[in-house]
Amino acid sequence: MKLLYFSGFSLIGESEIFNEYIIRNDVTASGFSYGAIKLVENIITGAYDSEHFKKRIDKVQLFSPAYFNDKDEKFKRMQLMFFKKDSRAYTDNFVKNCGFSEEEKEKYFSIGAYEELEDLLYYEWNAQKLEIIKKKNIIVETYLGGNDKIINSEEALKFFRQFGDVYFIKEANHRL
């Protein structure tokens, strides 16, 4: 049984922090933050249906999906400008605001690329994308933290509740 998991921005191998929630089987895939975007896009493009991969997925778990639909252009440009100015300081602060401890940061941190940050900031979550997933009979579970400092979890809740179960953990941050 191989876990299909997509890591968040500036992170590698952090899936174990979601052990409380993650379903480890051959037909469930999950992603954290930016990883949720990568997971959804891979399903939409049919990557798992291809001759090469032939992976059946019955359920996706989206952990604090990077939802910036409610942020304006100025906010997004500023984030990219700060990253370009000092990528190490930006990603350090980003991971800290996610709620990772120093020990976790040491274990999972990896400086993300400008293009990845741009992708996650400008990614447009829309009903069409999640309807494609639902039409493939894939169950969508979304996990959100009420004390998230990265995304507006209330706005994300409004959006994702249309497509499946949402677990809103009031006291949790972006890292859940």
Image (cartoon, rainbow, N blue to C red):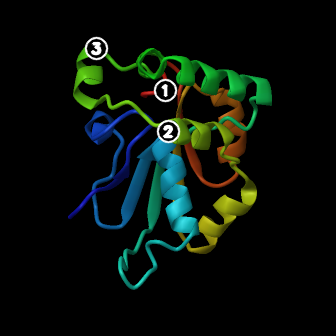
Of the numbered discs 2 and 1, the one sitting upstream in the chain is: 2
Residue shown at 28% from the left, 14% from the top: 102
In-image side of 95 versus 168 (left or right):
left
Q: Amino acid at mark 1?
A: His
Going from N to C along the chain, the mark reached first, 2 or 3, is 2
The residue at the point 49 percent across, 26 percent down is: 174
Question: Which of the image's four quarters has the C terminus?
Answer: top left
Q: Are marks 3 and 1 in contact (CB under 8 Å)?
A: no
x then y, percent, for residue 130: 65, 59
Could you tell me if the residues under marks 2 and 1 are in contact, i.e. CB atoms within 8 Å?
yes
Q: Is residue 149 visible?
A: no
Sort mark 3 into few (<14), some (14-19) or many (20+) by Cα contacts within 10 Å: few
Q: Between marks 2 and 1, how big is the CA–CA gap?
A: 8 Å
Q: Position of residue 62 (x, y in %)?
A: 49, 46
Q: Amino acid at mark 3?
A: Glu
Please name the amino acid that badge 2 sits on. Ser
Compared to 101, does 112 lie above or below? Answer: below
Residue at image point 31% right, 28% down? 109
Which badge, 3 or 1, is on the more N-terminal residue? 3
Q: Nearer the viewer, mark 3 or mark 1?
A: 3
Q: Residues within 10 Å of mark 2 (few under 14, many from 20)?
A: many
Q: Which residue is mark 1?
A: 174
Q: Which mark is residue 102?
A: 3
* SS category of the residue bearing label 3: helix
Asked whether 171 or 133 is in front, the reply is: 133
Q: Which mark is residue 33?
A: 2
Q: Is residue 174 visible?
A: yes
| Marks 2 and 3 in Cβ contact (< 8 Å) | no
